[in-house]
Amino acid sequence: RMEAALQASLLHSAQLIFIQRFRSVSDRAEATALLREAFDAGPVGSVLCLEATPELLVGPRAVSIGAVSLPRRAAAERLSPATVSATAEAAGILPLTTQAASLAATLCGLARGWMVLLVGGPAVGKTTLAC
């Protein structure tokens, strides 16, 4: 039982730290296949699935994506969860679910105090994400 929990933790960390750093979908798919083979992770849809989309929760005190959570600025604490969601939706700043895994990797790095490089073309949301 402990071995399965350790393996799941290793795969989760590898997904956050390594897989999401590849820029192309094909590179991420190849790295995921190698990781699955090395750790005998099982088929897509299994408990150790590496392709699962992490759940995004935006609240007045924290932002959580999957198992990674960061506290929000003090000003947001005065808002109710409904206000936070409505404000984010009205401003058009809710991320696409396709970005959830990359956002989880970004939050993981920020939570550990690591430098995070945000790359992309003009007007794609790099500054908004960093603030």
Image: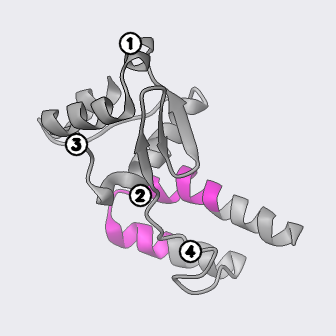
Identify the amino acid type marked 4.
Cys
- In the rendered image, residue 23, in percent from the top left (x then y), is placed at 34, 56
Which one is in front in this view, the residue at disc 4 or the one at disc 2? 4
* Residue that label 1 marks: 75
**Front position in the image: 109 or 78:** 78
Between the C-alphas of marks 1 and 4, the distance is 37 Å
* Residue that label 3 marks: 120
Q: Is residue 120 found left or right of 114 in the rendered image?
A: left
Report the span colored magenta.
12-31
- In the rendered image, residue 11, in percent from the top left (x then y), is placed at 65, 64
Identify the amino acid type marked 1.
Ala
Q: Residues within 10 Å of mark 3 (few under 14, many from 20)?
A: few
* Residue that label 4 marks: 49
Identify the amino acid type marked 2.
Phe
* Residue that label 2 marks: 22
Identify the amino acid type marked 3.
Gly
Task: Tell me if residue 115 comes above or below residue 47 in the rendering.
Answer: above
Between the C-alphas of marks 4 and 3, the distance is 28 Å
> Which residue shows up at 47% across the image and 71% down it?
51
Between the C-alphas of marks 3 and 2, the distance is 13 Å
